[in-house]
């Protein structure tokens, strides 16, 4: 875990990232890793505010297991609301399954580093069927009344209700999986899209980058990969170029 801006902490786990927003002695947790990341997430919270009782909300960019894996276990000890875009709630409740499955993985076994990624997923509890029945829709249209005051930015495509979060005053975008900077299946670093088989609608995910282009952002904290500093429009353009080059192969 590292502090990348005042009160903004970036942490990486088995194969994905989460962000903690601290204001005074209270926290907002954005995403929560694989099931195997539970000890690290809990330790991050303790290090920052001492007690899980000071977590005011868990915000979810989307309902894939590598972003909500620790939530059910944490909720057995924490009394905290879990919020996501309204279109993501059915997936969070377990009513629909909206992520890559075994058939998608088998169809892409020739992808670089696939064996290493599969091993990581297995060790991290990535085959678990995770649901959060208590999850509620977050309000849209402005900053949320939680520590850090993140603003939801609807960015569907990777999943039906994917949402990024803008920290307007800090100039930071928590981009989730709509725009990443690295992955165990990627051979490059820097702004890029996840492999297409991870997305519900790859073209919508690519088109959806437009929503980020004019945001007042100088730092991107992705769901996968390292923080990236620079104008978000440049990050969007790089991701588009890389996506086009992969499609043309």
Image: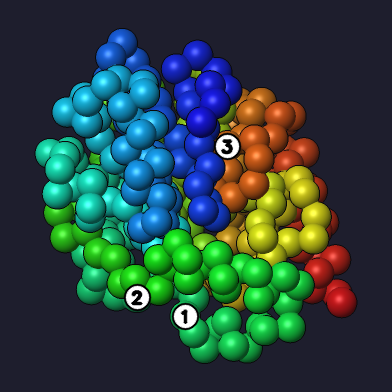
The quarter of the picture where residue 226 lies is top right
Residue at the spot 55% in from the left edge and 65% down from the top edge: 120
* Residue at the disc numbered 1: 101
Marks 1 and 2: in contact by CB < 8 Å?
yes
The Cα–Cα distance between marks 2 and 1, rounded to whole angstroms, is: 9 Å
Residue 192 lies, in percent from the top left, at 71, 53
Residue at the spot 35% in from the left edge and 44% down from the top edge: 39
Answer with left or right where residue 197 lies relative to residue 237. Answer: left
The disc label shown at residue 97, or none: 2
In primary-sequence order, the first of circles 3 and 1 is 1
Q: Can residue 243 be seen in the rendering of this structure?
A: yes
Compared to 182, does 184 lie above or below? below
Residue at the spot 58% in from the left edge and 37% down from the top edge: 221
Q: Residues within 10 Å of mark 2 (few under 14, many from 20)?
A: some
Answer with left or right where residue 124 lies relative to residue 90. Answer: right
The Cα–Cα distance between marks 3 and 2, rounded to whole angstroms, is: 26 Å
Q: Secondary structure at mark 3?
A: strand
Residue 200 lies, in percent from the top left, at 50, 72
Compared to 118, does 186 lie above or below? above
Q: Nearer the viewer, residue 204 or 116?
A: 116
Q: Residues within 10 Å of mark 3 (few under 14, many from 20)?
A: many
Q: Secondary structure at mark 1?
A: loop
Q: Nearer the viewer, residue 77 or 159?
A: 77
Residue at the spot 64% in from the left edge and 35% down from the top edge: 227
* Residue at the disc numbered 3: 221
Marks 1 and 3: in contact by CB < 8 Å?
no
The disc label shown at residue 77, or none: none
């Amino acid at each position: 875990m590292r502090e990348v801006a005042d009160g903004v902490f970036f942490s990486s786990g088995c194969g994905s990232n989460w962000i903690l927003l601290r204001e005074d002695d209270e926290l907002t947790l954005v995403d929560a890793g694989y099931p195997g990341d539970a000890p690290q997430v809990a330790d991050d919270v303790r290090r920052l505010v001492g007690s899980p009782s000071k977590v005011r909300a868990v915000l979810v960019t989307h309902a894939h297991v590598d972003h909500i894996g620790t939530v059910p276990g944490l909720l057995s000890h924490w009394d905290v609301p879990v919020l996501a875009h309204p279109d993501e709630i059915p997936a969070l409740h377990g009513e629909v399954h909206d992520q890559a499955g075994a058939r998608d993985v088998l169809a892409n076994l020739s992808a670089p580093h696939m064996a290493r990624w599969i091993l990581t997923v297995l060790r991290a509890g990535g085959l678990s069927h995770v649901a959060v029945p208590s999850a509620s829709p977050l309000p849209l249209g402005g900053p949320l009344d939680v520590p850090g005051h993140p603003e939801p930015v609807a960015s569907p495509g990777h999943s039906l209700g994917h949402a990024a979060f803008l920290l307007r005053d800090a100039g930071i975008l928590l981009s989730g999986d709509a725009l990443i900077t690295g992955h165990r299946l990627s051979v490059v670093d820097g702004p890029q899209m996840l492999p297409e088989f991870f997305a519900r609608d790859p073209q919508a995910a690519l088109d959806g980058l437009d929503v980020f282009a004019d945001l007042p952002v100088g730092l991107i904290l992705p769901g996968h990969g390292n923080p990236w500093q620079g104008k978000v429009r440049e990050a969007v353009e790089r991701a588009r170029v890389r996506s086009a080059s992969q499609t043309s192969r």
